[in-house]
Image (spheres, rainbow, N blue to C red):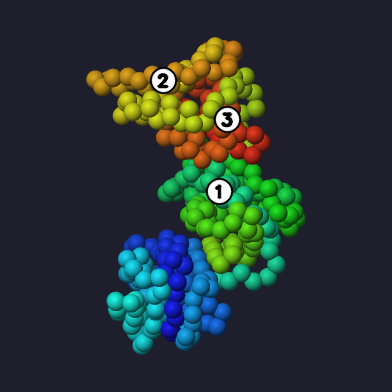
Amino acid sequence: MKAKFNKAALLEALTLVGSVVPSRTPKPILQCVRITADKNGVSICATDLEVGISFEITQVEVQRRGNAVVPADKLTSIVRESVDEVIELEVAEAAMHIRGADSHFTIYGHDARQYPAMPSFEGKADLEVELGNLQEGVELSVFAAARESTRYALNGILWEVHGKKLTLVATDGRRLAKSIVTLASAADAKLAEQRIIVPAKTMSLFDRIGGEETEKVTVRFVDNQIVLAAGPVVVSSKLVEGSFPKYEDIIPTDYDKKVTVRTEAALSAVRRAALLASEESKGIKLSLSKGSLVFSSRAPEMGDAQIDMAVDYSGADIDIGFNPQFLVDAMRVIRAEEFDLHLGDADRPGMIKTGADFLYIIMPVNL
């Protein structure tokens, strides 16, 4: 294999593809990327056996076709530090030579035939959605997914498809985020009968893909896998097995306290109040009364904090505690200038809504 690359295009591909490369693994070959050069361009891919990604580079001059498997971190570091606009990669036997105007690096790789096979996007799409819409839906839900739960279903995002609407739901048991994405066209009717759980890692990866917001993302479900394609990128992943909680049962429908809050102001108030939250409760108090919403915290032997906000509210008073980080996580991804805060009693969850497409449930904490 021998090819000349535009440095920026090569680095973009390596950075995105390298994000799935495991830092630790009993299989050293998984810490590599596979590079395949053919007449159409160069494909760079990586996998951790759960999630895989490939990136097709067209800003390249292929002089000799072939394959290479080399350590992802070394290659990415060399390309990142390069001062050249054009970088040449050449493979001879087990070595890759990386050349610039004044530099020559040699790194050793693995037999390309030993690298795991990667699914490609073949066949008719089960659904299509604009990249910008999908990425916004992911941002509004993925943060609430569990990180390392023994209930494997909580490590993923539930996909529910009905007509031209895709509902994404994530929860870690203490909070729940639900976003609704409008599809480019009505999805296959068979998907309406399925509760599909996609790993949160896969969705976070897709959220980092660059491109025009109006670019189409095509999605296929094959056996127990999801395959997504957007422009030069194809992401494949195993689906999460397990039963996702019946989230509809915990969404309140009888709350009588509602206040509209400016997103940026509330985010600032929560962050400031959290500066003196106690280590024991790790919570802040929201006190809602006529015309006022107060964010406060108190820590023994340290001090207290209070941030006042004027609001349009005339209902009953309520004091309720929340984990400030859980509030921050939601507020920093809300794109709307305002959101509605719904409350019931002090021992019931709080609910944040923006229009009909985003809902967030957060459990209270004792202060």
In terms of secondary structure, where does tag 2 sit? strand
The residue at which mark 1 appears reads as 138
Q: What residue type is labelled 2?
A: Ile
In terms of secondary structure, where does tag 1 sit? helix
Using the image, tell me which numbered label, if any, was put on residue 339. 3
Residue visible at 45% across and 71% down? 6
Q: Which of marks 3 and 1 is in front?
A: 3
The residue at which mark 2 appears reads as 307
- Give neighbour class at mark 2: few <14, some 14-19, many 20+ (Cα, 10 Å): some
**Quadrant (top left/top right/bottom left/bottom right) for the C terminus:** top left
- The single residue placed furthest to the left in the displayed view is 301
Residue visible at 62% across and 19% down? 256
Q: What residue type is labelled 3?
A: Phe
Q: Position of residue 201 (x, y in %)?
A: 48, 54
Residue 226's place in the image compared with 6, above or below, is above
Task: Estimate the spatial distance between the alpha carbons at disc 3 and disc 2, rounded to whole Å.
Answer: 18 Å
Q: Where is residue 225 in the image (x, y as percent from the top left)?
A: 58, 63
Task: Estimate the spatial distance between the alpha carbons at disc 1 and disc 2, rounded to whole Å.
Answer: 31 Å
Task: Give whichever of 226, 96 is nearer the camera.
Answer: 96
Looking at the image, is mark 3 or mark 1 earlier in the sequence?
Answer: 1
Residue 53 shows in the view: yes
In terms of secondary structure, where does tag 3 sit? strand
Q: Where is residue 318 in the image (x, y as percent from the top left)?
A: 51, 16
Residue 62's place in the image compared with 181, above or below, is below
- Give neighbour class at mark 3: few <14, some 14-19, many 20+ (Cα, 10 Å): many
Using the image, tell me which numbered label, if any, was put on residue 61. none
